[in-house]
Image: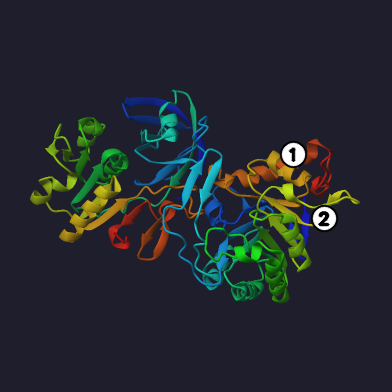
Amino acid sequence: MTIDLGRGLVLRNPVMTASGTFGYGEEYTDFVDLSQLGGIIVKGTTLNPREGNPYPRMAETPSGMLNCVGLQNKGVQYFIDTIYPRIKDFDTNVLLNLSGSTLEDYVKGAEMIDALDKIPAIELNVSCPNVKQGGMAFGVTCAGISQVVSEVRKIYHKHLMVKLSPNVTNIAEIALAAEAAGADSVSLINTLMGMAIDAERRKPKLSVVTGVGGISNATDAVEFMLAGASAIEIGTANFIDPAVSAKVAWGINEYCERHGFEKVTDLIGALEC
Amino acid sequence: MTKQIADFKLVEKRDFGRSVLLRLRSEQALPDIAPGQFVQVRVDGSPSTYLRRPISIHDVDFQQNKITLLVQQVGEGTRHLAAANLGDLINMVFPLGNGFTLPEKGENVLLVGGGIGIAPLFYFAKVLNDKGIKPTLLLGGKTESDLLRLADYQQLGETFVTTEDGSIGEKGFVTMHSVWQKQSFDKIYVCGPKPMMKAVAKLAAEKGVWCEVSLENLMACGLGACLCCVEDTEEGNVCVCKEGPVFNTRRLKW
């Protein structure tokens, strides 16, 4: 079931939990054996502490929820001093979601995270729509994404995943710009509808994509992988069934056995049309 | 406290009009449950209800693995829950939140409930009784029919009542009841609508009495992960689902 996303980020299976929906993992240990997951992506963190938006922050819809938390967090230094010691020995990959409002915030934050042995990757959040300067300015243009990714790349030595905003005209262009600037992978917050295809190879043009958005069971996860995702993140579904992430991992395994896929990587882009 | 996710079978249902009592039995032994903690109930079969619904724990029977909920129908989710039939399975994540701080033996304790906010005070009063503490209860409603299970509450401690229309007890709000003039208390615990809790908290503060309130902000995860249900406190925004729902009023910026 192993997935190698590159630059040292090797997942036990393709299932990760999306930032902001799984806390720091500690909140879910009564329900999920974290060693059953490919990784957990912990709460969106910024260089300096943020109080977030005032209550109320959430509206339910028939098919999910809208939220505007506004990146409430206690900052990178607090994470390093207080949270990291508690979660660094989890038997899974712990990725940190890093957000910022200026280029300097991203670079300084990434530099501090780079020093943490047990954090194998950053998910660079350039797509938070809920704060005035939540990195969106970087995430919606090719020039912006190139700038932030290339600057972070200079000082960050581990796997750099970039979480992109769906609120753009053409997400494929932005994703390609991120990759060209040194991103090891991208997590696509929306479905893969906008993906660029390499016609000659009949494969997605991007090498490593993590699929995010509306995955609540193994079938959803397999669909994302068949469409080209190397890994997937589970988000809001964690609120409905706190044990869902481990169930999805088992379900993907079961799917592979049932359909004769020897390796889970064989699922990636295997859609037959 | 270990949290569980489990299917419960609906084994008893009592209809109180707008509210309903649901007694639910699990196949598994229950973990420790503190008074004031809550459950997150999955609402099956309601197309417009996506998230679980947080409901306070009204009563617990550890011998028979039963949890009882008192559910007021306020929207589609709770309407669906109230329509459950005997034998239906209801999935719950529990116990969540922190619960009330237990008083010392010998302290004079007042439990103040308003409307459906009386629900968690039943289990709390039972636990206090088990510890040899007889609380005083002050329960308020708009009208007599809001005071659910009044006779059962009266078994757990001296019980005073107010109604806005005067249909039972003293007419007016809980803060206007004569018991405030006649008795003094060491600890006050409140659950009810926010304006009522704020009024009681203000009264307690004026008297210099320790006071805890149970909040019910809009929640999604119930586990402290999504940061949706925050309350503004002296330490900044904190999750009601994890750091609460019970807060000492000194922590709150009320």
Above/below status of B70 relative to B101? above
- Percent of width and height locating residue A26: 54, 56
Q: Is residue B30 left or right of residue B194?
A: right
The quarter of the rendered structure image containing the C terminus of chain B is bottom left
Colour convention of the picture: rainbow
Helix, strand or loop at label 2? It is loop
Q: Is residue B232 left or right of residue B178?
A: right
Q: Which residue is mark 2?
A: A205
Mark 2 — on which chain does it sit?
A
Mark 1 — on which chain does it sit?
A
Q: Which residue is mark 1?
A: A254
Foreground residue among B186 and A160: A160
Nearer the viewer's eye, disc 2 or disc 1? Answer: 2
User: Are callouts 2 and 1 both on one chain?
Assistant: yes
The image quadrant that residue B206 belongs to is bottom left
In this orientation, does residue A184 appear? no
Q: Amino acid at mark 1?
A: Glu
Above/below status of B234 relative to B157? below
Compare marks 2 and 1 and give the one earlier in the sequence.
2
How many numbered circles does the render carry? Answer: 2
Residue at 29%, 49% (x, y): give it.
Answer: B194
Residue at 66%, 66% (x, y): give it.
Answer: A119
